[in-house]
């Protein structure tokens, strides 16, 4: 995205996250007193639908179990969709 000088040379696009039921999800990072910030994905009503836990722990809302996908609008990845959990987590 940059050449090491901090100036953006490209834009990947705007990611839209959805769960397997088609609900649009929004990223929220939960501030904590630790070095890592857990990521949660909430729907339009503010209900947590998926998460990317900062530890390898059991989670009933994990990206793998919920089936989160991401699709890009605009930018270099316009129209590209990913459903692989590892890729979705990176984009989160």
Image: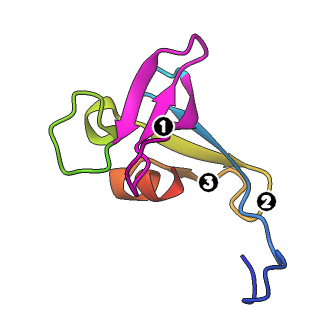
Q: Which residues are magenta?
A: 24-52
Q: Secondary structure at mark 3?
A: loop
Which residue: 30% across, 29% down?
Answer: 61
Q: Is residue 35 magenta?
A: yes
Q: Secondary structure at mark 2?
A: loop
Disc 3 packing (10 Å; few <14; some 14–19; many ≥20): few
**Mark identifier at residue 75:** 2
Q: Answer above or below: position of 84 versus 1.
A: above
In front: 43, or 56? 56
Which residue: 83% across, 78% down?
Answer: 9
**Residue 20 seen in the figure:** no
Is tag 2's residue or tag 3's residue first in the polypeptide sequence? 2
Of labels 2 and 3, the one closer to you: 2
Q: How many marks?
A: 3
Indicate the quadrant where residue 5 lies: bottom right
For the residues labelled 1 and 3, the Cα–Cα distance comes to 28 Å
Is tag 2's residue or tag 1's residue first in the polypeptide sequence? 1
Q: Quadrant of the N terminus?
A: bottom right
For the residues labelled 2 and 3, the Cα–Cα distance comes to 10 Å
Q: For the view shown, which residue lies furthest in the left direction?
A: 58
- Label 1 near label 2: C-beta < 8 Å? no
**Residue 81 seen in the figure:** yes
Which residue: 79% across, 80% down?
Answer: 6
**Mark identifier at residue 69:** none
Of labels 1 and 3, the one closer to you: 1
Residue holding disc 3? 80
Residue holding disc 1? 30
In front: 52, or 29? 29
Q: For the view shown, which residue lies furthest in the bottom direction?
A: 4
């Amino acid at each position: 995205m940059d050449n090491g000088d901090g100036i953006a040379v490209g834009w990947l696009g705007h990611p839209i996250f959805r769960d397997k039921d088609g609900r649009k999800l929004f990223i929220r990072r939960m501030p904590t007193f630790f070095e890592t910030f857990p990521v949660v994905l909430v729907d339009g009503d503010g209900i947590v639908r998926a998460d990317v836990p900062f530890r390898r722990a059991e989670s009933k809302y994990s990206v793998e179990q919920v089936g989160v996908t991401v699709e890009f609008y605009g930018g270099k990845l316009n129209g590209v969709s990913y459903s692989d959990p590892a890729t979705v987590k990176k984009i989160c």
